[in-house]
Image (tube, rainbow, N blue to C red):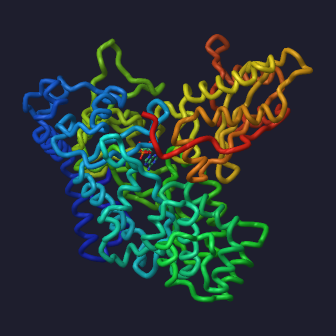
Amino acid sequence: MTVDSGLPPQAAPPPCEKDAKALRFIEDMTRNCDFVQVKVLEEILSRNAETEYLKRHRLKGRTDRETFKARVPVITYDDIQPEIQRIANGDFSPILSAQRISEFLTSSGTSAGERKLMPTIQEELDRRQLLYSLLMPVMNQYMPGLDKGKALYFLFVKAETRTPGGLVARPVLTSYYKSKHFMNRPYDPYNVMTSPNDAVLCPDSFQSMYAQMLCGLYQRLDVLRVGAVFASGLLRAIRFLQLHYPNLCLDIESGTLSQEITDPLVRACVSGFLKPNPELAEFIRSECIKESWESIITRIWPNTKYLEVIVTGAMAQYISILDYYSGGLPKACTMYASSECYFGVNLRPLCKPSEVSYTIMPNMAYFEFIPLDSAGSVSSRSAAPPHLVDLADVEVGKEYELVITTYAGLYRYRVGDVLYVTGFHNSAPQFRFVRRKNVLLSIDSDKTDESELQRAVDNAAALLSRFDAGIVEYTSYADTKTIPGHYVVYLELMVKDAGNSPSHEVLNLCCLAMEESLNSVYRQGRVADSSIGPLEIRVVRNGTFEELMDYAISRGASINQYKVPRCVNFMPIVELLDSRVISAHFSPSLPHWSPERRL
Ligand code: AMP
């Protein structure tokens, strides 16, 4: 068990008063974890006492924990979907929150195939900004001199839409990048970025990336850290450089901007950098043309001290490839957040990915935890609902599911994240992110669960039935060896009439049929963000799934309880499947996707 008392060891003193203040704030919050939590709950419940939701649960203005826990149920998104729909339709009465819902944040978690809509209020932006303002002061303790250069961060906005009632619905980062908090941020020498705001705000992901890459290349010697929000985003940027360095170099050589960049704001914002620089162009060309892209990041941006990307949770699958491209630079996972609420920060941002723990900041929301047993299930010996544990009371070495009550009007809401307590910083617990519940496959921000995959397979089966063929068994794999990564579905087929077996084209169409039925975050990744590659079917020869079972049993699985895993990531199993592949097929085109929601 690790118990931090005060600031972590090896930390340098804060380089400026602003940092000192931020670190004092962290100390203050974490020393008084339970006290802050009681205050947060009181504040949330007293301001929202007159909301329809809290009145329905007979809270009658009470703000104490006991009454709250006794009367307000623990819920999931589906429980409040009717309320969310009313707000989306334009009912501005105080349903969940006494404050006006300012917009909806569209989560990458889905319900009925569409992004979940998370109501938010204006002041939440301040709370998010507060969490962001803690990140550099923490980092500056471990990495001095970041004021001597810049950050090359690939940041993107995504499509936004309006609900029938006129509220904007967009991802939380899009909301933040478009806010005055980001746009009008005061100059901070420790947080200067190479990307101009207008390049970040361009909704066309190609033009945005092109402009950000160009600016990053021009300022290559200033760059001290390279990053994106998630590891998958940084890898996409590297892939972009691989594909587009010839054009980028032409632009740098001539000091003109490619005609492919048509957005006038993007053209204007990069024009300041555009000077003919044949030497730089030649250097980049000579590096990119080399067969090996090992350490390409440090070859092009030689002063990079670390990468700033989330490599915990689903993103851990990208660690080795990031190491390859960066020559093993440290990878800083700085924060843990969601559309519902920003949770906390990593107080040792340069630790190894396997040691990352996030300290939940007790001022962000009211946090409760459902204890899980060693099998990852809710631990409750009786039929009664489990007893939820408060933030300050979680125990080191145990796993919990996170439940939040927010200022914006989510009460005892199950986020779906499973966390493991690694220790405490003062009286605030620190958590390792274990997994997201019910997620089978994830490449970028997409999250596909077992029932969604089953539906996709059913769609493929319907197509195959026309050829008297059926699917005997299936499993899946997130293949991240390609950039972008893609879903692989292994199928064992039963073909009744060998003369009428489904052709290569039909199996390609099965890939597309599967993609069409996956959720909108997946399809957005395929269509708008190009962050997911075409789905692949690998047909395996008959008997493969029996071999899979034999293998599992030889490793100790019970023959009676054996179930075909619907997703595999244990390499020997993937290799076994791959060695039995008789044909491979890819989606021939993009599935449908538009920013509009199905209502
Ligand atoms: P969204 O609601 O689309 O913003 O997604 C939020 C979810 O992303 C969280 O609930 C987590 O499951 C995941 N997530 C966010 N930050 C991290 C992190 N630092 N490490 C692992 N997973 C994360």
- What residue is shown at x 83% (from left), y 34% (from top)? 504
Q: Position of residue 148 (x, y in %)?
A: 43, 82
Would you say 326 lies left or right of 579 here? left
Task: Identify the residue at the far left of this view.
Answer: 61
Would you say 317 lies left or right of 508 here? left
Task: Give the quarter of the figure containing the C terminus.
Answer: top left
Q: Please identify the quarter of the rendering in which residue 254 is found.
A: bottom right
The count of marks equals 0
Would you say 166 lies left or right of 250 here? left
- What residue is shown at x 30% (from left), y 61% (from top)? 7
Position of 250 relative to 420 (above/below): below
Position of 305 relative to 37 (above/below): below
- Between 186 and 30, the one nearer to me in the picture: 186
Q: Position of residue 495 (x, y in %)?
A: 83, 18
Q: Please identify the quarter of the rendering in which residue 248 is found.
A: bottom right
- Between 422 and 311, the one nearer to me in the picture: 311
> Would you say residue 336 is visible in this rendering?
yes
> Would you say residue 317 is visible in this rendering?
no
Position of 79 relative to 184 (above/below): above
Q: Position of residue 459 (x, y in %)?
A: 65, 25
- What residue is shown at x 33% (from left), y 51% (from top)? 344
Q: Position of residue 126 (x, y in %)?
A: 25, 58
Task: Give the quarter of the figure containing the N terminus.
Answer: top left
Would you say 287 lies left or right of 62 here? right
